[in-house]
Amino acid sequence: MHRTPLPQIPVLFAICSLLLTANVFGQSKSGGDVVVTKCWSYPTGETSGKVLASDTSHVFLGFGLAKVEALSFDGKKMWSSELGGDINSNFLALDSALMVVTSTVSTDPETHGGSVLRNLSKQTGITNWTLKLPDAENHFLVGFKDSIVVVSKSGVIQSIK
């Protein structure tokens, strides 16, 4: 009588399945566990930040009343600048400057006090130059090639060089 190999095939298939699933779904332990370490912290007191940005050497924090602080990457305050009014844009950290839009405070609730694009020195926080923008509640800044694009919530988009 001649035997057929059919009963051996399901057994062989079951063994291969177990071996493959152990390799596919099993986790291999890496050479070392990842350890997360807190490098530094910077207390802001009761004031919460509104805007945050960084570049290769600074962390920039924006607070209410248009206060801007620059920290080094070891958490030490480099400078602080009070621009007056309120910050109503993101920060744009360029090679040589920090860009931000501020608005002056208005007593009329229907209007904003006016929007100003500011170019701050990243080393000192001193304003290098300003440019009046169309009044808007918020602005968004982005670098594009060698210019700055300002998108205002009022519906105006402009490129500044």
Image: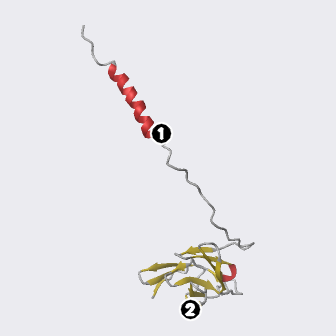
Mark 2: secondary structure:
strand
Would you name the residue on which mark 2 appears? 128
**Residue drawn at the location 71% of the way across and 73% of the way down:** 44
Residue 152 in sight here: no
Quarter holding the C terminus is bottom left
**Residue drawn at the location 33% of the way across and 18% of the way down:** 7
Quarter holding the N terminus is top left
* Tag count: 2
> What amino acid is at disc 1?
Gly
Q: CA distance from mark 1 to mark 2?
A: 59 Å
Would you name the residue on which mark 1 appears? 26
Mark 1: secondary structure:
loop
**Residue drawn at the location 55% of the way across and 82% of the way down:** 98
Is 108 left, or right, of 34 in this rendering? right
Task: Determine contact: label 1, label 2, CB under 8 Å.
Answer: no
**Number of residues whose C-alpha sits closer than 10 Å to that of mark 1, classed few (under 14), some (14–19) or many (20 or more):** few
